[in-house]
Structures are given as C-alpha cells and as structure tokens.
Image: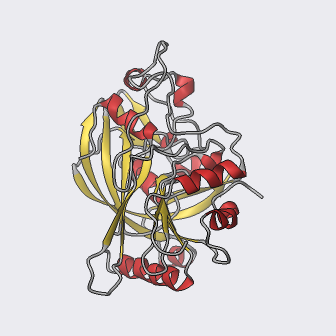
C-alpha cells in the first residue's frame, strides 16, 4: 500500500503514511511515533549479523515491509497508527476493502471514507481520504482544474537505474493501455492519429529534475501534469532510466556494449528487473533479493487548496519508506 497521512480541514480528512507492497501481499510497518508529519522516518536499529551482502542497516534488505500474511485487522491497525495529525470529529485485502473498518476504528460512525487521491498501485506515498462528500468533490475539482492549467499538485521521488541525459526537463508521450498476454500494460504510441485519441490514446506530460546521482543511479523528482496508468514508470523507461524495482517495464530497456536502447514495448513481457553486479554490491543485495526489490517511486508531496479561495495551498509531506531511505544511504544519495 501507499502512505497515509491524516489531517482534517473543515470536514476533510486526509490520510497518508503507509508503505508500498501490501497489494502484492507484502504489507507495511508504521514508522516510529517521533517520525511525524513532514519529517523523514528514522532508521531503526537492526540486529547484528553478517552475510555477504548485509548493508549498513543490517540483514533486512527492505525495512518497512511486513510479511505476506497480513490480516485485515493488522492492516486496519497499521492504517490507524499511520495517522499523524487529527483534528475535529472523530474480499481482497485492499485499501478499499478495509475502509469500513478504518472508518469505525477512527470513530467516524456512519461516515464513509472515500479515496480522493492516491499514488499508483505499486508506489508508496500519500493517500488522500475524505469522510465528507462535499469536501471530496471540492478536492476532485481542485485537482482537475490544476491539471487543465498545467499546475503540478504532486511531487514524486524516484530512484532510477541509470542517470538521465539532462538534469531537468519534460517528458511527453502518447500512451495507451494494451492487453498483452493477459496483462494490461501501458504502451507508447508514436504520432497518434485523431482516431487513436478517440480510441483511448492519451497525450501525457511529466516534468523531471535530477536531485542527486551516484553509483550509476539517480534520485529524481517527478511532477506529473497528466494522469495515466503507470505514466511515471513508462516516462522514465523512455529516458532509458527505469525506476529501481520496476518489474513491469524495465525489460523494455536493452543494453549492448554499455549503450542503452529501447526495445519494442509490444514484444516485451513483464519480468523481474535485472541489475548489474556493481549495483548489487552497492545495494548489498543478492540477485534473488533484487528480484523482490520494491518499486522506488514515492508520492512525497501533495498540494491541497486552503480553506478559502485565496488561501495559500496546504502542503502535505510523506516521509520516505525505510527501504527507500536505505537505498539512498547505500547509493550515497541525499534528498535535499
């Protein structure tokens, strides 16, 4: 799942600090109580031990992820524990399936929580929930108007395998969803026609900025100005720098004699990301551990409207998941 933060303005409730992986069965672990709103989660001490690839944080390669057998009760408890600021009145294991229990756990009684904004399925970061239909509608309109005006309201952090050629810029691509071997995949479309647009092809746009580089990787800030499934992952693949832990699209980047190139998207099935030996050593991971690497794409910052129209936007921050912070530490990267 993604992060959950809680805050209420008028009748608005925002939840957001919950880590990725739960839909895949991995689950999450709440951060310490003192790692509060808009702060970085502190590294937890790991028991001493030695292995060939044990890193500076110990033998656990992906701190912050829970075991696969997460129960409904544990998920609700973790969501409730992830609330970092609270003001005002109080089937498949997914966020949607446990919203009734979460509402009850937060003392909302008959009020139903609904998802207003969330990062992608495999991403970490903020999740915006509301128990007030009027506020949810207002927030949705705010995000729609911001997209039309090309005003970014979200900033993602990503660690990429590879360093973009430019330090900052924009990525534009026409994308479509295509069903390939039983899986819905996002595929780029070159020079889309009017018919393509009518049939579901969408022109997408993201801004990016390289924050830091090291060990052949980059810490990149991404601002999507459109919304499309897996948009940011595919955009970084088009830059020949797939997101670390992208086991869906990274195989579209090939390498010959050290030179990277794009492979046809339609002919490449999803497969576990393959990292070179030097990067594995930096990350203190074995190849089998790297095959379980979580997606390093985190919805770090979200802008919300103030209570009144002329108020300064409210900024919500989600701390990085512990496994994300561990990766930055291993690579010598720093989020400024």
Res 181 seen here: no
Coloring scheme of the render?
A: secondary structure
Name the one closer to the observer, 178 or 106. Answer: 106
Quarter location, residue 112: bottom right
Q: Is residue 272 above or below residue 50?
A: below
Query: What percent of the width, then of the height, locates residue 143?
Result: 41, 77
Residue lying farthest right?
91
Establish if 42 lies above or below 303: above
Nearer to the camera, 131 or 34: 34
Q: Quadrant of residue 108?
A: bottom right
Q: Is residue 192 left or right of residue 213?
A: right
Q: Is residue 188 above or below residue 138?
A: above
- Expressed as whole percent of the image width and height from the top left, the position of residue 182 reads 71, 52
Total marks shown come to 0
Residue 94 or residue 270, whichever sits in front: 94
Q: Residue at 37% across / 24% down in the picture?
A: 282
The reply to whether residue 123 is visible in this rendering is: yes
Q: Position of residue 262 (x, y in %)?
A: 43, 45
Which of the 4 image quadrants contains residue 87?
bottom left
| Above or below, comparing residue 319 to residue 254 in the picture | below
Provide residue 232's location: percent of width, then percent of height: 43, 56
């Amino acid at each position: 799942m993604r992060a959950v933060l809680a805050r209420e303005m008028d009748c608005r409730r925002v939840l957001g600090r919950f880590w990725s992986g739960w839909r895949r069965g991995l689950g999450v672990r709440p951060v310490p109580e003192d790692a509060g709103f808009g702060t970085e989660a502190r590294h937890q001490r790991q028991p001493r031990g030695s292995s060939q690839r044990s890193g500076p944080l110990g033998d656990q390669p992906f701190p912050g992820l829970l075991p696969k057998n997460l129960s409904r009760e544990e998920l609700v408890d973790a969501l409730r524990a992830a609330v970092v600021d609270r003001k005002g009145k109080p089937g498949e294991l997914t966020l949607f399936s446990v919203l009734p229990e979460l509402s009850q756990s937060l003392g909302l009684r008959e009020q139903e929580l609904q998802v207003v904004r969330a990062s992608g399925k495999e991403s970490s970061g903020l999740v915006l929930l509301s128990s007030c239909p009027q506020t949810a509608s207002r927030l949705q309109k705010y995000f729609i108007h911001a997209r039309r005006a090309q005003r970014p309201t979200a900033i993602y952090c990503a660690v990429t395998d590879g360093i973009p050629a430019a330090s900052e810029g924009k990525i534009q691509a026409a994308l479509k969803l295509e069903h390939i071997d039983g899986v819905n995949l996002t595929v780029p479309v070159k020079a889309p026609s009017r018919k393509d647009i009518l049939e579901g092809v969408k022109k997408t746009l993201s801004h990016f900025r390289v924050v830091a580089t090291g060990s052949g990787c980059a810490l990149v800030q991404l601002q999507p100005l459109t919304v499309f499934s897996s948009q940011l992952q595919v955009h970084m693949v088009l830059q020949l720098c797939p997101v670390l832990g992208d086991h869906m699209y990274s195989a579209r980047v090939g390498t010959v004699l050290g030179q990277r190139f794009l492979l046809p998207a339609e002919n490449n099935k999803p497969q576990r990301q393959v990292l070179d030996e030097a990067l594995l050593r930096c990350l203190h991971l074995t190849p089998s551990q790297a095959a379980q690497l979580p997606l390093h794409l985190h919805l770090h910052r979200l802008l919300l409207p103030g209570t009144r129209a002329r108020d300064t936007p409210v900024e919500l921050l989600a701390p990085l998941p512990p496994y994300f912070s561990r990766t930055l530490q291993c690579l010598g990267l720093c989020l400024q």
